[in-house]
């Protein structure tokens, strides 16, 4: 098995950062959706944005997080295949 060079290690670090950022975005979106679900007619929340628009923004934020996680996984897979095919 070939040993990883500094470039491979940087790719691994970038993948880790992408996956962690995606997870953080998903957690933020989950928190926002939880806050929106606690609103009611007595506590309608801010008047500047409707609950539906806020929920849509949180959903798009969650989609962005999942997208970052998928990009990180694809880059990790490509890096692993590239490393395994490299000559010793």
Image: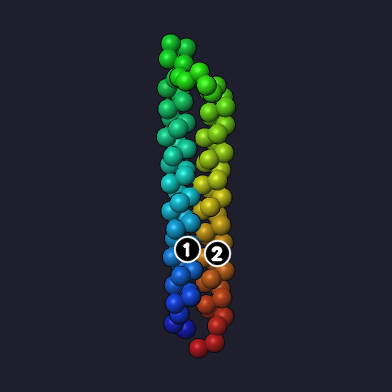
Q: Is residue 8 left or right of residue 56?
A: left
Q: Which residue is drawn at 50% across and 88% down?
A: 88
Label 1 or label 2, whichever lies nearer to me, is: 1
Q: In this view, does 52 lie to the left or right of 7?
A: right
Q: Name the residue under label 1.
A: 14
Q: Mark 2 points at which residue?
A: 75
Q: Residue farthest to the top?
A: 42
Q: How far apart are marks 1 and 2 (CA)?
A: 9 Å
Q: Position of residue 6 (x, y in %)?
A: 44, 77
Q: Position of residue 66 (x, y in %)?
A: 53, 48
In the foreground, 36 or 77: 36
Instruction: Report helix, strand or loop for mark 1.
Output: helix
Q: Is residue 19 shown above or below 50?
A: below
Q: How many labels does the image show?
A: 2
Q: Is residue 77 shown above or below 1?
A: above
Instruction: Choose top left, top right, bottom left or bottom right for residue 71.
Output: bottom right
First in sequence: mark 1 or mark 2? 1
Q: Which residue is drawn at 44% across and 60% down?
A: 16
Whether the residues at callouts 1 and 2 have beta carbons within 8 Å, the answer is: yes
Instruction: Report helix, strand or loop for mark 2.
Output: helix
Q: Position of residue 38 (x, y in %)?
A: 42, 22
């Amino acid at each position: 098995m070939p040993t990883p060079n500094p470039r491979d290690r940087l790719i691994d670090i970038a993948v880790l950062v992408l996956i962690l950022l995606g997870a953080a975005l998903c957690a933020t979106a989950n928190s926002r959706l939880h806050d929106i679900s606690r609103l009611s007619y007595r506590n309608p929340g801010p008047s500047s944005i409707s609950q539906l628009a806020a929920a849509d923004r949180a959903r798009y934020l969650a989609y962005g997080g999942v997208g970052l996680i998928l990009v990180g996984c694809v880059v990790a897979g490509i890096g692993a295949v590239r490393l395994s095919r490299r000559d010793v």
